[in-house]
Amino acid sequence: MSPALAFLGISILGTWGLASIGLIAGGIIMLFFPGDPTTASDNTLGGIVLIVAGLVSGGLMQVVVAPLLGLDAPVPMRKKDIREHASFTRWAKAGQVRDYVDGMPKEIRLRAQRVLIVRQGENIYAMNALCSHARLPLAGLAGSPVKAQPVQDGCVMCPFHGARFEVANGKVVRQPFSSSFNNDHPFLGGLQSKMFKVLRFVPMPYQAFPVPKFARPSMDAEDAQTYPVKIEGEDIMVGLPR
Ligand code: FES
């Protein structure tokens, strides 16, 4: 990529990011520092609109920027888009069997794709590293208390909201926010399940209107895309899509 093109891209993205932050900051100022009290009600409405616009703008920016930076796996996130292994014919080395702790999922990056590797004894499985519920990493966040969970009954559990997926075929066997998960995790489960439900409707000062379907946070997880795996000697080879 030429330096001029890179500079142009960075300028556009920087302006976009600053504009998103500005919208959110403006909304907060209108809400909490309204100034002239005679216009307080208008400020409330305007502040909420600005914050929502800033969040939407920031979200759109992430959708555009993340694939460009290789931060997101360009594999299907929807069950209806899941692809057959026959088209996953670019084989990439994913380390050796001994590099993986038995029963503990680990995320790796293979040619800009985020892949979750799961070792079960001598068997190795690979699936999309992002949970199909809210696109959060199934292996948790490094340096945070949200960490990868050991495989149980052949299933990996998303540490954020408790969805469970079979490692062998990616099938979702438990949806997010199950009552047992919510009971065990008051913040990630109990509180966030309520937040997800509330976010499906944006409260306005005078009325509540439904958020368009495409922008609503999903309450459900879908089956995950898996990758073909073969062992060559000690090496793990993962098939990536063409
Ligand atoms: S992000 Fe995985 S269950 Fe919500």
Image (cartoon, rainbow, N blue to C red):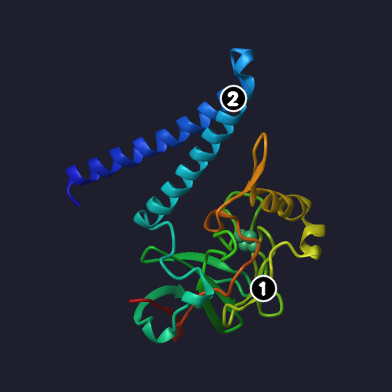
Residue 40, placed above or below residue 230 = above
The amino acid on which the numbered mark 1 sits, given as a three-letter code, is Val
| Residue pointed to by mark 2 | 42
Ligand 1 quadrant? Answer: bottom right
Q: Would you say 42 lies left or right of 85 here?
A: right
Q: Would you say 12 lies left or right of 237 here?
A: left
Q: Is mark 1 on a helix, strand or loop?
A: loop
Point out which mark residue 151 bears. Answer: 1
Q: In which quarter of the image is residue 185?
A: bottom right
Q: Would you say 9 lies left or right of 140 here?
A: left
Q: In which quarter of the image is residue 215?
A: bottom right
Which comes sooner in the sequence, label 1 or label 2?
2
Q: Position of residue 24 (x, y in %)?
A: 52, 33
The amino acid on which the numbered mark 2 sits, given as a three-letter code, is Asp
Q: State the residue at coordinates (67%, 69%).
A: 150
Residue 204, placed above or below residue 196 = above
8 or 49, which lies in front? Answer: 49
